[in-house]
């Protein structure tokens, strides 16, 4: 098919070497939660299908025990409340920063639902714990 494209995040976790290689192609920032704070891996690639000749760029992240990686669809940050205010990447990051690691996944989902009961877009959330 023509005129179709898709955002994608590719995450390769290398546990023996305590690192991950992350490529973001047109998706919201991937968030890496570490003891030192939250790091954003922003999209530096076009969504897949825009161009035939794709050379994805990626970032290598050193990881420690307990670090977590979060990838998500735009339906989370773009969820709007009754006032048409978006949940936003800033609330995603704040929720992850100030929530204990064992509760982050559930807390982020519940925060999004509390912010707006009405779901107009699908959303997907992936958590990888090292």
Image (cartoon, grey):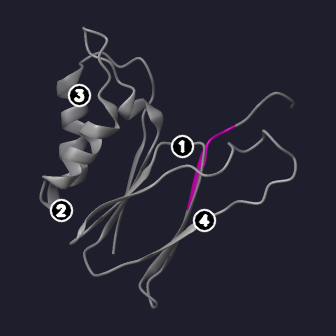
Neighbours of disc 3 within 10 Å: few (<14), some (14-19), many (20+): some
* 75 within the magenta span: no
Q: Is residue 106 left or right of residue 21?
A: left
Q: Residues within 10 Å of mark 1 (few under 14, many from 20)?
A: many
**Looking at the image, is 76 positioned above or below residue 115?**
below
Which residue is the site of mark 1? 27
User: Magenta segment range?
Assistant: 6-10
The kind of secondary structure element at disc 3 is helix
| Real-space Cα separation, disc 1 to disc 4, in angstroms | 13 Å
Residue 98, x across and y down, in percent = 13, 52
Other residues around mark 2 within 10 Å, as few (<14) / some (14–19) / many (≥20): some
| Labels 4 and 3 touching (C-beta < 8 A) | no
Q: Residues within 10 Å of mark 4 (few under 14, many from 20)?
A: many
Label 3 – label 2 distance at C-alpha: 20 Å
122 to the left or right of 93: right
Q: Position of residue 89 (x, y in %)?
A: 34, 38
Discs 1/3, front: 1
For disc 4, the marked residue is 58
Residue 64, how many percent across, how many down? 30, 81
* Separation of residues labelled 4 and 3 (CA atoms): 32 Å
Identify the residue at image location x=29%, y=28%.
87
Which mark, residue 113? 3
Q: Which mark is residue 101?
A: 2
Alpha carbon distance from label 1 to label 3: 21 Å
Is label 1 or label 2 in front? 1
- Secondary structure mostly seen in magenta is strand
């Amino acid at each position: 098919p023509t005129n179709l494209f898709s955002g994608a995040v590719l995450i390769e976790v290398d546990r023996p070497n305590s690192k991950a290689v992350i490529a973001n192609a047109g998706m919201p920032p991937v968030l890496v939660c570490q003891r030192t704070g939250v790091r954003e891996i922003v999209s530096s690639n076009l969504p897949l299908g825009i161009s035939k000749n794709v050379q994805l760029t990626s970032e290598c992240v050193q990881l420690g025990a307990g670090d977590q990686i979060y990838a998500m669809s735009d339906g989370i940050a773009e969820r709007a409340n009754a006032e048409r205010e978006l949940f936003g990447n800033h609330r995603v990051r704040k929720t992850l920063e100030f929530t204990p690691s064992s509760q982050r996944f559930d807390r982020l989902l519940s925060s999004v639902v509390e912010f707006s009961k009405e779901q107009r877009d699908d959303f997907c959330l992936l958590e990888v714990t090292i």
